[in-house]
Image (cartoon, rainbow, N blue to C red):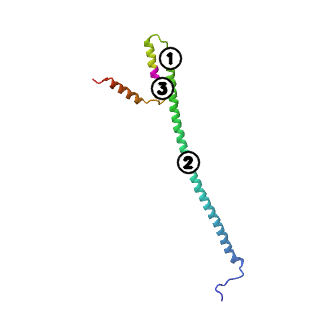
Amino acid sequence: MPLYDIKKDFSKEARWPYITIGILFLIIMLFGTLFITSSVRSVRLRRANDELTERLANATNSCTELAGQLSDCRGTIEQCRGYCRDIDEISERSIGTARDAIEIIEETRYYVMCLEVELGLIDTDSIYERLDSWLESEQVDFIK
């Protein structure tokens, strides 16, 4: 007697559970494959989204900083225009005496120094340091 008794003639009722299990297995495999594929794609898209969000945040911060610098530059430009208008007004004055000439020269020097400070060509601290060292060299003592 054989170890396995296999019926060679399967009836439709006997084959139906095997076919159903096979179809269900294929459907489960299909959905599993789709799930894994979509999960991998989802992870990649999430990673790309995070990277792009970070780049957008960096670009926004850069634009904000540039806007602040632009407003600072506009203030500087307006201040420099004001100093240039003052120098222009000074240059149009007539010189009658030596005192007038000295006043015009001193005012012009003052506005040129203001322009240099505004444009960052000189530091205000260095002006005070030079003035202090000059006063010390002249032995001027203000404290009595």
Q: Amino acid at mark 1?
A: Ser
Left or right of 62 in this view: 98: left
Q: Circle 1 — which element?
A: helix
What residue sits 53% from the left and 36% below the top?
67
Write down the residue under mark 2: 53
Look at discs 1 and 2 and give the one toward the viewer: 1
Q: Are marks 1 and 2 in contact (CB under 8 Å)?
A: no
First-in-chain label (1 vs 2): 2
**Residue 2: in magenta span:** no
Write down the residue under mark 1: 91
Write down the residue under mark 3: 115
Look at discs 2 and 3 and give the one toward the viewer: 3
Residue 125: horizontal and vertical position, in percent? Answer: 40, 30
Q: Mark 2 Cα within 10 Å, few/some/many (few <14, many 20+)?
A: few
What residue sits 51% from the left and 38% below the top?
65
Residue at the front extreme of this rendering: 137
Left or right of 44 in this view: 135: left
Disc 2 to disc 3, C-alpha distance: 43 Å
Disc 1 to disc 3, C-alpha distance: 16 Å
- Tell me which corner region of the image, top left, top right, bottom left or bottom right, holds residue 28: bottom right
